[in-house]
Image (cartoon, grey):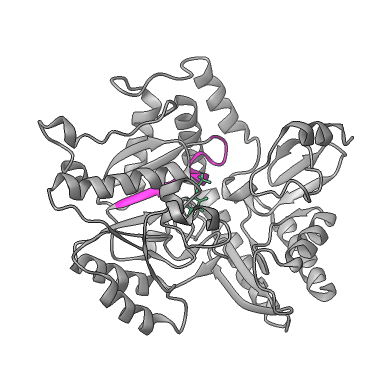
Amino acid sequence: MNKLAERDQAVIWHPFTQMQTAPLPVPIVRGAGSILYGADGREYLDMISSWWVNLHGHAHPYIAQRISEQLQTLEHVIFAGFTHQPAVELAERLLEILPRNQAKIFYSDNGSTAVEVALKMAFQYWHNLGQPRKKVVALENAYHGDTFGAMAVSGRSAFTAPFVPFLFDVEYLTVPTAGQEADVLKQAETLFTNDVAAFIVEPLVQGSGGMVMYEPAFLDELFQVARRHDSLIIADEVMTGFGRTGKLFAIDYLQAKPDLMCLSKGLTGGTMALGVTSCSQALYDAFLSDDKFKTLFHGHSFTANPLACTAALASMDLLLLPETQANIQRIAKRHTEFVHELTNYTIVANIRQRGTLLAFELNVGTQTSYFNDIRDTAYNFLMDCGILMRPLGNVLYLMPPYCTTDEQLTYVYKQVKALLTVI
Ligand SMILES: *Cc1c(COP(=O)(O)O)cnc(C)c1O
């Protein structure tokens, strides 16, 4: 049974994996709903939506059908000088659900490229206006992706250490979690000056940073400070987009509207790689000119791949169904009930929830980093129960696909409670 895993080990280098010490990877042969089926006959409930991408369950028949039809019609075409129905329709439909000030859609391949594009648009916006600005403000412990620009605007950590000399400087604001607000506002008043090109944030929930959550009203205040200095605002909704927070986008909880937005992950329902950077009319207009040098010189071979755009259209059909919206609220409500139970455990600290996202910390020992032993203990315990969760250090979190049933949730909560009593 381990044959595939061993062949894998001979030829493959996995993401975010120390290949010397990592156990053999688990071969998965198929998926359906929230369940992944292992080659050895075991089943795993995918409670992290396969790295935050899956919305409607695995191998969804409707999405599969739509991609299959598209595949037999047009698999790909160059996107400079040419266009196609799925790209146009997806842009139109995205603009219908994004904040009203978003006016144009730029396609790329993943979350990191969506961020790269947003940064390039922001820097070149100021360049094209003839008022170059260099400074970028981000939140501490932010995560915006693994390419160089995206790494630069992310927090500095063990993950970025070897690359620090190659990353451009960014000014960091403390994350405005409960109790920090007044201090952060004070910091913001000094950090934001008239040379800030852009302020980039993961609105309301910092994902990789440990599912850290903060309040919309306060982000609105920070945006106001940024606006006073004409800083552009980039909302990185690569993780929070498409219903995770209980609304279609985290930014929907705010009054303010961003100039740029980055989308990926749930965009195709977790089926195919696709990235989107959307922007306001004013940002777009700064690139219109008789001067060719004002062009945005950016593109990828697979820009607006028709199969990926079709997957996104199919996923959007499903997402907007009243049934799916009800499922999102159902999961949010079940999580809230579970939060009440969790408060009874002394080992549990900092419980937080926003919509379908639930996170808490395990209060054990002094180690609280990503490289914590607790992480492996929890991961292995849950895998043995047939539940895929990938704690971020001592932070346990749930991010289920929206099709996850009440019965499945009940099982997961029960096993998490079992973990809390043995740890
Ligand atoms: C995952 C993530 C990214 C990077 O997306 P990739 O598709 O993995 O490159 C960027 N921003 C946020 C907020 C993310 O969670």
Location of residue 321 in the rendering, given as x and y in whole percent from the top left corner: 50, 45
Q: Residue furthest front?
A: 165
Location of residue 42 in the rendering, given as x and y in whole percent from the top left corner: 85, 44
Please tell me which residue lies in front, 148 or 166.
166
Residue 182 seen in render? yes
Location of residue 28 in the rendering, given as x and y in whole percent from the top left corner: 76, 38
Image quadrant where one finds the N terminus: top right
Q: Quadrant of residue 159?
A: bottom right
Image quadrant where one finds the C terminus: bottom right
Over which residues does the magenta segment extend? Answer: 260-272
Q: Is 273 on the left-hand or right-hand side of 133?
A: right
Q: Is 422 on the left-hand or right-hand side of 66?
A: right
Please tell me which residue lies in front, 242 or 378.
378
Q: Quadrant of residue 257?
A: bottom left
Location of residue 147 in the rendering, given as x and y in whole percent from the top left corner: 47, 45
Q: What residue is at 72 percent from the left and 84 percent from the top?
A: 346
Residue 205 lies in the magenta-colored region: no
Residue 237 seen in render? no
Please tell me which residue lies in front, 188 or 127.
127
Residue 261 lies in the magenta-colored region: yes
